[in-house]
Image (spheres, rainbow, N blue to C red):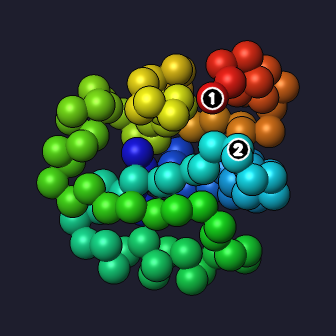
Amino acid sequence: FWATWCAPCLEEIPSLEYLARQLNQKPGLPQLYAISEDESIAEVPKLFSTLEHSISFHSLHDPTGQLAHAMGTSKFPETYWLNSKGEVRYKWIGPQNWLSSEVLAILAARGQ
């Protein structure tokens, strides 16, 4: 969960994009979805158009915050690793370096 007005969210976009590209290279690996909490979905492509690289992860919109609330999100960015049954395997609060050895170890250990 993120928003275009959230500076920490913007910080992690480059490493998040790199992770998404790695996941997209092999069929069967999990997919990355970024759920915007912006009031207007128009803000997302507007922001993406200013970036130096294209975005390959999926972008969804939760304008009322209903899904974020249901998941227990309290701070942006907040990231959830879900298994194929939709169960939360891990939760990160705040910006992450998605290329760090710590994050990659958690992703590998949690599996799908």
Residue displayed at 17% across by 45% down: 66
Graded by Cα atoms within 10 Å as few (under 14), some (14 to 19) or many (20 or more), the crowding at tag 1 reads some
Residue displayed at 21% across by 35% down: 69
Q: Is residue 3 visible?
A: yes
Is mark 1 in CB contact (under 8 Å) with mark 2?
A: yes
Residue placed most toward the observer, 111 or 76: 111
Q: Position of residue 5 (x, y in %)?
A: 39, 59
Q: Position of residue 24 (x, y in %)?
A: 73, 57
Residue displayed at 73% across by 74% down: 53
Q: Of helix, strand and loop, which one carries label 1?
A: loop
Q: Is residue 18 visible?
A: no
Figure label count = 2
Q: Of helix, strand and loop, which one carries label 2?
A: loop
Residue displayed at 48% across by 54% down: 34
Numbered label attached to residue 16: none
In the image: residue 109, left or right of residue 86: right
> Between marks 1 and 2, how big is the CA–CA gap?
8 Å
Q: Which residue is mark 1?
A: 112
In the image: residue 102, left or right of residue 92: right
In the image: residue 98, left or right of residue 76: right
Q: Which residue is mark 2?
A: 29
Q: Give the answer, above or below, for where 49 lies relative to 108.
A: below
Mark sitting earlier along the chain (1/2): 2
Q: Amino acid at mark 2?
A: Leu
